[in-house]
Image (tube, rainbow, N blue to C red):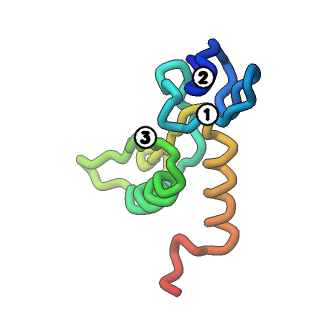
Amino acid sequence: MKCQVCNSDINEVSTCPVCGAEIEPENINLKHYPWLLVYTTNTLIDAEMFKANLESADIPVHILSQIDSTRQLTIGDLAIVKIYVPSIYESDAKAIIEQIESDGSLFNNE
């Protein structure tokens, strides 16, 4: 990856170690970062709501639904929905999810 200000080759994701410029998320090549599991739930609706909150914070999100749609099972290992984000966003995503769960803002209509 190259710094957009000084054009130095860098490995840092938030600031350039050469010139100190902040690297904008859109300049990050996500192909170089593994996607990590940050949350699991048993309903697709909950996963979609978390996804919307994370995307509003400019965090890319992928949802992997493993719900057995042929039998409409919504409990146990046959009803898991996983939320993945690139590794560089893992701590931010977990902090957002933790905040949502602690204050219940995802589920309250206040």
Which residue is located at x 67 percent, y 64 percent? Answer: 99
Which residue is located at x 68 percent, y 32 percent? Answer: 21
Report, in whole angstroms, how far the alpha carbon at label 1 lies from the one at label 2.
7 Å
Q: Secondary structure at mark 3?
A: strand
- 16 lies left or right of 64: right
Which disc is residue 3 wearing?
2
| Kind of residue sitting beneath label 2 | Cys
| Kind of residue sitting beneath label 1 | Ile
Furthest residue toward top? 9
| Kind of residue sitting beneath label 3 | His
Which residue is located at x 69 percent, y 69 percent? Answer: 102
Picture quarter containing residue 68?
A: top left
Badge 3 vs badge 2, beta-carbon distance below 8 Å: no
Query: In this view of the protein, which residue sits in the foreground, 84 or 44?
Result: 84
Disc with the residue nearer the chain's start (3 vs 2)? 2
Question: Label 3 belongs to which residue?
Answer: 62
Eyeballing the image, is 8 above or below 42? above
Q: Comparing marks 3 and 1, which lies closer to the viewer?
A: 1
Eyeballing the image, is 60 above or below 18? below
